[in-house]
Amino acid sequence: MVVLTWGVLCLRTAECIEYEALSCRKHTALLTDFGGKGDGKTSNTEAFRKAIHELSKFATDGGAQLIVPPGKWLTGPFNLTSKFTLYIHQDAVILVSQDEAEWDLIPPLPSYGIGRDNPGPRFISFIFGTNLTDVVITGGNGTIDGQGQLWWTKFRQGQLKNTRPYLIEIMFSDHVQISNLTLINSPSWNVHPVYSSFVVIKGLTILAPVDSPNTDGIDPDSCSNTRIEDCFIVSGDDCIAVKSGWDEYGIAFGMPTKHLSIRNLTCISPDSAVIALGSEMSGGIQDVRAENIAAITSESGLRIKTAIGRGAYVKDVFVRGMTLQTMKYTFWITGDYGSHPDDHYDPKALPVIQGINVKDVVAKNVTIAGKLAGIDGDTFNGICISNVAIELSEQAKQLQWNCSNIKGVSSQVGPQPCVLLPDKNTDCPFPTDTLPVDKIQFQTCAAATTMH
């Protein structure tokens, strides 16, 4: 174990690091105190697992913090514990093991029924936790490198029998903070809070090649009271994908994503959305608030993806303040997305899409202003778009608004929307109340680098 005295953290090896502040937890340790070696070659899987096991004993005594110091730390997946902070130093790089033998298989998510890549069990996520409370994953913008290229190649070549691991996944937990990190080259989704509440995600830089498969940035899934802010994402898939389960499995599980705040996001995703709702939304999505959103060279600004068989709802969505540059679509709503886990979905389970409000948008170099398609016999209602200025690209389509099976209004929108969005001289609403998650105090940890 280590001791903290007068801002100096000392190991049994007599190596010390001076810290400006270590205020997150009562107890603190370094990975090297458990045999960790940051040479980029030695496996640190056992060091991480041993450290977290030992530090879990302090959950009832002020909690514990594990510091990953400067170096390159190769490791397989590991599980977190409650009342715990994982702090990754700014000069630390955690390298994710590519050895499949290090990855346990776990059951598919109950709200999905099967693995997202393949039926059956899925690989456990790299940093994983379930049934936890008060968990912080943070640092001085230290890096987690998923080393995803091998996983992407195996996926494309059909060599994987199980669903690829996510980089960070926290399940059935509450009061979770993920902040001030750089995540690169995830095997699949980057950050996946699921079945959790009071989740704060702040100050992440997420980078993946724009042609990498399914490297979603942040996917809040069947979560309540989630705050995502101050993030920069370059992705091969949606930068933010809001989810809540898949067809009959999501309907049966019945856990919506609700009370979600997204602020100060910058996104680059040439083949996907800046913010997507769905397509897995069968537990419902309600009360989503997004503001101050910027995107460059992305497929669509706001996208809703759903289909027959999804059931549930997407409602009470509020977006304001989008600045978009070089987009295929500004707005894209799809009622025929397809993609089902199996053939047992209910064709009578139609999604309710209602109360979609977007205002104060500036978009330049756009190919198509809006493609908004509901479902025959299932009109998507309450769409409001106001104060939107869209400048078209040289390759712009002649038909700028393609609308079917929708109903709503518009105001001060150019180019002029379709007839299903008549001009009503209105200002689309945005909530003025404060979400409970906005009252959560953000935890800040800081560490200097002086070593002696």
Image (spheres, helix red, strand yellow):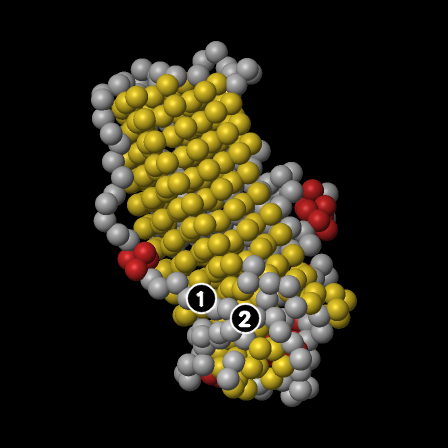
Residue 446 shows in the view: yes
Residue 141 placement (x, y as % from top left): 56, 59
- In the picture of the structure, the residue carrying the numbered disc 1 is 444
Dot 1: what SS?
Answer: loop
Q: Which residue sits at x=68%, y=76%?
A: 36
Q: Quadrant of residue 420?
A: top left
Residue type (three-letter) at the residue carrying disc 1: Thr
Dot 2: what SS?
Answer: loop
Do residues under tags 1 and 2 come within 8 Å of each other at their CB atoms?
no
Q: Is residue 341 above or below residue 139?
A: above
Q: Which residue sits at x=49%, y=82%?
A: 27
Residue 363 placement (x, y as % from top left): 44, 27
Residue type (three-letter) at the residue carrying disc 2: Ala
Q: Is residue 435 left or right of residue 228?
A: left
Q: Which residue is at the front of the view, 442 or 117?
A: 442
Q: Which mark is residue 59?
A: none
Q: Is residue 373 left or right of residue 166?
A: left
Q: Which residue sits at x=69%, y=67%?
A: 71
Q: Which residue sits at x=33%, y=62%?
A: 440
Q: Quadrant of the C terminus?
A: bottom right
Numbered circles on residues, count: 2
Label 2 neighbour load within 10 Å: few <14, some 14-19, many 20+: many
Q: Is residue 384 above or below residue 451?
A: above
Residue 62 placement (x, y as % from top left): 42, 81
Q: Is residue 390 above or below residue 184?
A: above
| Distance in Å between CA atoms under marks 1 and 2 | 10 Å
Residue 33 shows in the view: no
- In the picture of the structure, the residue carrying the numbered disc 2 is 447
Q: Is residue 322 above or below residue 25?
A: above
Q: Residue furthest right?
A: 41
Q: Quadrant of the N terminus?
A: bottom right
